[in-house]
Amino acid sequence: MAVVLTIAQQKGGAGKTTLAAHLGAVFAATRRVALLDIDPQKSLARWFALRVGAKAACALDLADVSGWRLGGELARLGRSVDLIIIDSPPQIATDARVAMRAADLVLVPIQPSPPDLWAAEGTLALAAAEGRVARLVFNRAPAASRLRQAMTEEIAERGLGLLTQSLGSRSAFASAFARGLGVTEAAPRSRAALELRALADEIIGVVT
């Protein structure tokens, strides 16, 4: 069966969809990967359509079913790929619960700020209720700041899991996404690509 990575966050602007896309692209270089877009905005599906037009080198599959068909689609994908990445809806609803229940890891992107952490609390609580492993990841993060350090310390004090590797606020991520590519494809030697590869390695370390 495939490893399932569910990306979830209730707060808008945390970069949930772009993170799903970039992780999909970097993992597709070495694995069979399927993306599952169950966010009603369908931004990941739109990125995938751009990707098809760009004729990206790394093959990815995409499904965007939801509702009563979601469980069956997860089972179908799990038989044909190594990794499923789910872009989940921001609302804690039935689809979000199914996506979390299926997850080997729930990844919660936040910017290093109190509102993002507050918004993540509901997601973390749902993951805990479903008995799932969850990790926070700093996304669109400044390289260093007093606020970031304070947030890192607060997360540690509260016993919440935070991945060591973060993704910076870098234009390369947005530029690649706008072309239907991952940053490791569009700018493979960039600092952004190095960060993403390191994050992918850390994620694999958590789920294996």
Image (tube, helix red, strand yellow):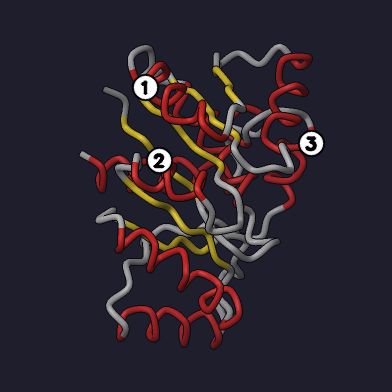
Q: Work out how far the residue at label 1 is from the one at label 3, CA to CA, in angstroms.
A: 31 Å
Q: Quadrant of residue 61?
A: top right
Q: Nearer the viewer, mark 1 or mark 2?
A: 1
Q: How many residues crowd mark 2 within 10 Å: few (<14), some (14–19), many (20+)?
A: many
Q: Work out how far the residue at label 1 is from the one at label 2, CA to CA, in angstroms.
A: 14 Å
Kind of residue at disc 1: Ala
Q: Please state the horizontal and vertical placement of residue 111, each as a whole percent of the image.
A: 58, 69
Q: Please state the horizontal and vertical placement of residue 121, each as a whole percent of the image.
A: 46, 73
Quarter of the rendering occupied by the N terminus: top left
First along the sequence among labels 1 and 2: 2
Q: Secondary structure at mark 1?
A: helix
Q: Please state the horizontal and vertical placement of residue 208, each as a whole percent of the image.
A: 20, 39
The answer to the question of whether label 1 and label 2 lie on touching residues, with beta carbons closer than 8 A, is: no
Q: How many residues crowd mark 3 within 10 Å: few (<14), some (14–19), many (20+)?
A: some
The residue positioned farthest toward the front in the image shown = 68
Q: Work out how far the residue at label 2 is from the one at label 3, CA to CA, in angstroms.
A: 23 Å
Give the residue at x 40% y 16%: 76
Mark 3 lies on residue: 178
Mark 2 lies on residue: 5
Nearer-the-camera pick, 190 or 176: 176
Kind of residue at disc 3: Ala
